[in-house]
Image (spheres, grey):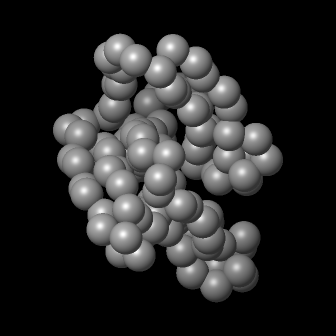
Amino acid sequence: MGAGQGGAKSFFGGDGLVLLKISGQGQTLACSYGAIEERNLTAGQSYVVDTGHIVGFDSTVQFAVQGSGTWKSTILGGEGLVCRLTGPGRVLIQSRSESSFLSWLLPKLPSKSN
């Protein structure tokens, strides 16, 4: 089984999107935050998902990372990035976003000054 990184395209994915190419025979263990939902895309069918929800996808699936709003709202408003996945192929998506959970949790934690 072989693995390789996604390169510059994954670096600019935002929200912790790092691509790892896995190939060969055998089983792969994937961990996610929440349940994993499987989507099977037909040729040319697209699915847009927040980058923080992607667990994996087949090598036949094409992807393009884009802002979820205008460039101004993405940069200044804190809106995240989304990924347009286009089939054919299988896409695995996690039901929860780790960054959303941390955004909710961190303000509630006591600080050292308290």
Give the x, y percent position of residue 98. Answer: 41, 39
Q: As rendered, which of 111 and 70 lies closer to the eye?
A: 70
Q: Residue at x 72, y 70 (%)?
A: 75
Quarter location, residue 45: bottom left
Give the x, y percent position of residue 88. Answer: 38, 62
Q: Residue at x 32, y 45 (%)?
A: 92
- Labels in figure, total: 0
Q: Does 70 appear above or below 26? A: below
Q: Does 83 appear above or below 1? A: below
Q: Is residue 40 left or right of residue 53?
A: left
Q: Residue at x 66, y 27 (%)?
A: 4
Give the x, y percent position of residue 99. Answer: 47, 44
| Residue projecting furthest to the right | 8
Q: As rendered, which of 17 and 57 lies closer to the eye?
A: 57
Quarter location, residue 89: bottom left
Q: Residue at x 57, y 32 (%)?
A: 21
| Residue projecting furthest to the front | 25
Residue 104 shows in the view:
no
Give the x, y percent position of residue 25. Answer: 40, 18
Residue 4 shows in the view:
yes
